[in-house]
Amino acid sequence: MPALSSYLRKVLLADAVVSGAAGLVMIGGADLTHDLLGLPSALLFWAGVALIPFVTLLAMIARVGRAPVWLIAAIIVTNFAWVAGSLFVAFGPAFGPSLFGQVFVIAQAAIVAVFAELQIIGLRRSSAAA
């Protein structure tokens, strides 16, 4: 397994921290934010639960500092899939969030997209250093 650049390790750790915080807020606040966001409590809760293994993986990789390229690529793809799913939640016919809910979903999707882009940069730096 190739060593990851310091930059990529920091990006993965930051993604883990932000995703972990978001997951805890979604799990703990699903019932409280339902009316404000106009999103089903179950969607918020289970999206938060889904982040737990993702956050664990990110933190483990950042700590160890080594991972196969395909695993980092899978993390990047997962982040972009989260963005696509978020856009569906914000604008698709299935959920109908409030305006504040749309803004919230789009904002978190933008943050996830930035992490994916930073991870692409980090992967390139790690590959160039190898």
Image (spheres, rainbow, N blue to C red):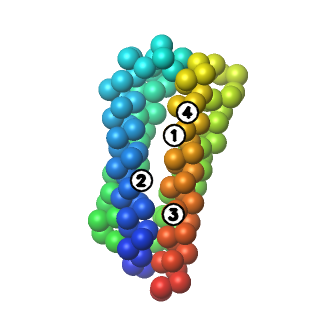
User: Mark 1 vs mark 2: which is more N-terminal?
Assistant: 2
In the foreground, 38 or 69: 38
Mark 4 Cα-neighbour bin, 10 Å: few <14, some 14–19, many ≥20 = many
| Residue shown at 47% from the left, 86% from the top | 130
Furthest toward the bottom, the residue is 130
| Residue shown at 57% from the left, 30% from the top | 103
Secondary structure, mark 2, is helix
Secondary structure, mark 1, is helix
Kind of residue indicated by mark 2: Asp
| Residue shown at 38% from the left, 67% from the top | 9
User: CA gap, disc 2 to disc 4?
Assistant: 17 Å
Mark 1 Cα-neighbour bin, 10 Å: few <14, some 14–19, many ≥20 = some
Image quadrant where residue 60 sits: bottom left
> In the rendered view, would you say 130 is above or below 8?
below
- What residue is shown with label 2? 15
User: CA gap, disc 1 to disc 2?
Assistant: 12 Å
| Residue shown at 53% from the left, 84% from the top | 128
Query: Where residue 108 is drawn, which disc sits there?
Result: 1
- Contact (Cβ within 8 Å) of mark 4 with mark 1: yes
User: Mark 3 vs mark 2: which is more N-terminal?
Assistant: 2
- What residue is shown with label 3? 119
Secondary structure, mark 4, is helix
User: Mark 3 vs mark 4: which is more N-terminal?
Assistant: 4
Q: Point out residue 90 in the picture as x, y percentages from the top left corner.
A: 63, 29
User: CA gap, disc 4 to disc 1?
Assistant: 5 Å
- What residue is shown with label 4? 105
Kind of residue indicated by mark 3: Gln
Mark 3 Cα-neighbour bin, 10 Å: few <14, some 14–19, many ≥20 = many
